[in-house]
Amino acid sequence: MVALVIALALFFDFTNGFHDTANAMATPIATGAIKPKSAVTLAAILNLVGAFLSTEVAKTVSGGIIREGSDGIQITPDIIFAGLMGAILWNMITWLKGLPSSSSHALFGGLIGAAVAGIGFHSIKLEGLLQKVILPAIFAPLIAGIVAYICTRLAYALTSRHDPETGSKLTQKRGGFRTGQIFTSSLVALAHGTNDAQKTMGIITLVLIAAGTQDPGSGPEFWVIAACAFAIAIGTYAGGWRIIRTMGAGLTEVKPAQGFAAETSTASAILASSHLGFALSTTQVASGSVIGSGMGRKGTSVRWSMVGKIALGWLFTLPAAGLVGALTALLVKTGTVGVLIAAIAGTAAVLFMFFYSRKSAVGHHNAIEVEEAGQAVKFRKKKGLARARAKARAQEKNLAPESSRTGLGTPDAEAAASADADTSKETQR
Amino acid sequence: MKWLELVTVAGATLVAAVTVVVLYSLGVRLTAIAADSRQASPGVKKSFAYICFGLCGFAVLFGLYLIIPYFSG
C-alpha cells in the first residue's frame, strides 16, 4: 500500500507539473517571447530548482480542511490513496478538455470525498473549506483580473505615441515587453516549483511516517525530495499543451505588453498571497490575469464562452474529484481486492485518456501559432481537426455528464474567433 | 474569516504589479523615443530607459528573495 501511494503521489506530482506549465509559460509562448520548446525546458528547470529550494513539510496534508491530528481523525494511507486517485483523474479530464484548473483544489476534493466516504461528514471542517477553497476561487481571478486590467491599460497608455503635428503613430517598440515576459514568467515557474512539489513531499513523508519507516516530525528524506522534484520537472517538460493553448490563445489573443501585464499581475498575486497569508491558487490567478489583460486592451475580445467553461470546470473540481475519491475509498475499505480493483481501474482510466488524447495530439508544434516577425497571434484553421474534436466531444458526452457543458468551441465558433482576431489585428495597426 | 488578509493581498498585488508595469512601460517608451531619428539627446533617454529596466530587475530580485526560503525564512 505504501509503495502504491508513493507511486500515485509521484504521478500526481507529474500531472500537477504538466497541468500548470500553462500558468507560467502560456503567454510568453503566445507572444513569441520564448519558443515553445525552450519555454517548457526553462519552466522544467525552474520547477526542479524550486523543488530543491523549499523542503519544509506542510503540517497538514489537507491544509486545515479535514480535522487532522490528535483531536480529529487520523489521515491513513488509504484516504490519501483515494484522494490522490480523485485528484489525478480530475487533472487528466481537465487536461483532455484543455481547461486550466487548480491541482491543489482537485487534491482537496479527492481527500474530502475519501474522508467523507471513509469516515463521515464530521471529518470535514466546513469553515476551512470555505476559507481555503471557495472564497479563494472567487477572489483569486477577481483580484488578478482587476490588477491585470489596470496594468494593461497603464502599459498601453504609457507606451502609446503619436506625432503631435500629424497625429500619426510613432514607433512604440512594444516588442520590448517580450524580454520582460521571460523574467516574470520565470518567477511564476520558480514559485510553482517551491510550492507544489512540497505538497507531494509532504504526502509521501506522511505515508512513510504512518508506515513506521520514518521518525515522526522529521523532514522529507533526500530521495523523496529528488523524486518529487524530478516528477514535477518531467511533468512540466511534457507540457500540458492543450491548456497552454487555452490560456495563450483560447481566452483572448495576447500581445507582448498585455502578456507582460498579465504575467506581472500573476507573479505579484502569487508572491503576495504566499507571504501575506491568504492562499490563492496559481491557476486561478493566472487565468484571471489573462482575462483581465484581454479586457484591458482595445480591440481585443475576451471569449466569454471559454471563460464560462473554465468557471464551470472550477465549480466541478471539488465534487468530481470528491466523487472519485469517495468511490475509491469505498473500494479500498473492502480490502486488498478493492485496492487492486481501484488501482487497475485508475490506471486503465488514465491510459484510456492518454490514448484518447493521441487522436488529436496537441504538441509544442501546433499548440499556438505565432507569427515570428509580427505581433499577431493566429489561430489554427484546421477544420478537419476541429471536426474530429467535435465528434470526440459527442462521444464523451456519454462518459462524463458535466463535460457536455464544458465542451470546447464548435468549428463555427472557432472560425468566427479567428475572423475576430484578424479584424482586431487590423484595428491595432 | 480572513478579510483583512484578503484585502492586504489584493492591495500588495496591485501596488507591486502597477509599479513594475509602469517602470517597464516607461523604459519601453524611452527606448522608443531614443530610437527616433530626430532626437536631440538619445544617449540620455537611453540611459533613463536602462535605469527603468534596472529597477524592474530589482523587483525581480526581490521576488527571488521572497521565493527562496533560505533568504526570507
Image: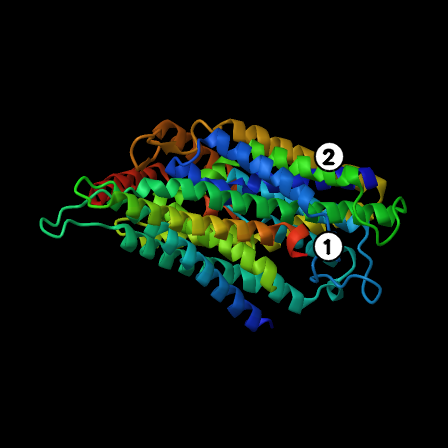
A216 vs A242: above or below: below
What x and y, as percent, mark residue B73?
68, 56
- The residue wearing badge 2 is A344
Few, some or many C-alpha atoms within 10 Å of disc 2 (few <14, some 14-19, many ≥20)? Answer: few
Residue drawn where x is 13% and y is 52% of the image = A164
Q: Amino acid at mark 1?
A: Ala
What x and y, as percent, mark residue A272?
54, 59
Image quadrant holding the N terminus of chain A, namely top right
Q: Is residue B53 left or right of residue A62?
A: left
Q: Secondary structure at mark 2?
A: helix
Q: Earlier in the sequence, mark 2 or mark 1?
A: 1
Residue drawn where x is 44% and y is 57% of the image = B17
What x and y, as percent, mark residue B44?
29, 47
Image quadrant where residue A92 sits:
top right
Few, some or many C-alpha atoms within 10 Å of disc 1 (few <14, some 14-19, many ≥20)? Answer: some
Q: Amino acid at mark 2?
A: Ile
- The residue wearing badge 1 is A58
Residue drawn where x is 31% and y is 43% of the image = A174
Name the chain letter of the residue that bears numbered label 1: A
Q: Is residue A427 left or right of residue A305?
A: left
Both marks 2 and 1 on one chain: yes
Q: Secondary structure at mark 1?
A: loop
B54 vs A129: above or below: above
A351 vs A290: above or below: above
Q: Is residue A363 left or right of residue A91?
A: left
Name the residue nearer the viewer: A236 or A124.
A236
